[in-house]
Image (spheres, rainbow, N blue to C red):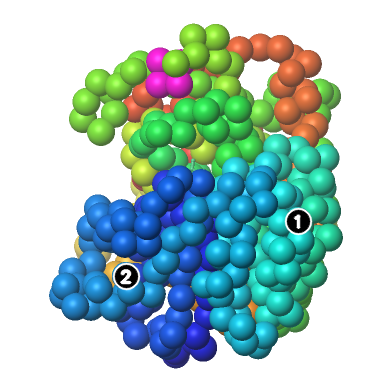
Amino acid sequence: LKVDPFDLIVFGGTGDLAHRKLFPALFRRFLDGQFAAPTHIIGVSRGQMSSAEYRATIAQALQQFSGEAASAETLKTFLDMIDYVSLDVGAEDGWSVLEKHLSGDPSRVRAFYLATAPDRFGVIAKQLAAHGLVTPASRIIVEKPIGRDSASAARINDAIGAVFSEGQIFRIDHYLGKETVQNLMALRFANALFEPLWNSAHIDHVEITVAESIGVEGRAAYYDAAGALRDMVQNHLLQLLCLIAMEPPNSMQADSVRDEKLKVLKSLAPIDASNAATSTVRGQYHAGASNGGAVPSYTQDVGNEKSATETFVALKVSVANWRWAGAPFYLRTGKRLPQRVSEVVVVFRAIPHSIFNVESGRISKTRLVIRLQPDEGIKLWLMLKEPGAGGMRLRYVPLDMNFAEAFQIYAPEAYERLLMDVIRGNATLFMRRDEVEAAWRWIDPIREAWSQLNEPPRPYFAGTWGPAAAIALVERDGRSWNEEI
Ligand code: BG6
């Protein structure tokens, strides 16, 4: 299970992502005994600080975000692997200091993690090359969002691609690192039951919900320029859609899976000015109640009274191919919704003929609910006979599998899995360049249509399920969002 010793360089090493996600994930992998000495982690940022001071900030971050109890000695062993280099990526100083921290062994994995804004990706790649820091065993890891539309994504990919080959580039979509998201592939391709039915002849529609109860937290500037479509749909929701809709890949090998996902992205029927009004809903939260307390409006949260940025999106998406024509995918995501819940609901078609009389009750459609987070699990809702001697009463009940109960072992956080995959060189759970750009090419016309329509986002109160129009989007088709949430 151990990985070979490696050097990991975290640009944006003092940032939110590093503190909240990366270091806690590294710590957890370290506690699990996965690191071999002498592994070395180097935080890089602009501010002046000694390595000792940096380690103290990391210790604090671990205390706040990791929830792992460790002895002082264990913690010290981990912190001792960490150093800090102060560096302005646009300037020339500091790179040689960084180099001194890196192993001279050309076969040792050197992973550059760019936990920075995407407009820094190109310059960092260029500087790494200019200062001779890129070895054959080097890898670069970039966070989403890669750009803000297909043109800027292509520019960023070009700039990184000028220095690193595609096989060295790991584009993170942390949803792919979630255990339950990987389970979508296990469920579909390791069982004989579902795949024969996995098409529009048997499936009525699919719902994908990624709901958050939080607002924009400390990321107002980023979020206000991005909005939910760029922040969540272009990456996380489309990746989920791909895993559900794709053809069976030939193997779990990275390009087999990515080829199939790409085909799905290319099959998405365009949403543009001709159909955006009927296929999309964009919303923005107003003051309301969330997590048991009163919360301000989005415009107050970001300090921009005029903001027309969407914090909620619902879409009706058609995957225009033989497998899916006629079975729409309804997607929704938003901030300040009633609860944090992500799930995929696959609703099968109605039975063709009922042999039961009306007293037996209404026959609901078979429904497969895959709960991605929290309370990860899978429910298959079926009609069964209610026990009793008084005739045939049917009831809709779930076959219910809860991962925590079924496995009772620790499920790693997405970043734990993904970071170790980078070190091992396994790219299956990372996005290839063409995928990212195909996703943007589908997203761009939606944004253009919205700006042509020039309507403000529809309001919804914080703590509700988004604008009423999002419910109408599904009900217009005689369907409804999963009410069980
Ligand atoms: C990030 C988005 O990619 O995903 C955030 O930028 C969002 O806005 C987050 O809050 C949600 O991730 P998770 O793992 O908490 O569902």
Q: CA distance from mark 2 to mark 1?
A: 30 Å
Residue at image location 37% in from the left, 62% down from the top:
51
Residue sitting nearer the eye, 172 or 176: 172
Q: Residues within 10 Å of mark 2 (few under 14, many from 20)?
A: many
> Which residue type does callout 2 highlight?
Leu
Of the 4 image quadrants, the one containing the N terminus is: bottom left
**Bounds of the magenta segment:** 298-302
Residue sitting nearer the eye, 351 or 108: 108
Residue at image location 71% in from the left, 64% down from the top:
131
Residue sitting nearer the eye, 442 or 6: 6
> Which residue type does callout 1 highlight?
Lys
Give SS at disc 1: helix
Q: Position of residue 242 (x, y in %)?
A: 67, 58
The answer to whether residue 267 is magenta is: no
Q: Which residue is mark 2?
A: 79
The disc placed on residue 126 is 1
Look at the picture and state if 311 lies above or below 248: above
Left or right, 176 with respect to 165, comes to: left
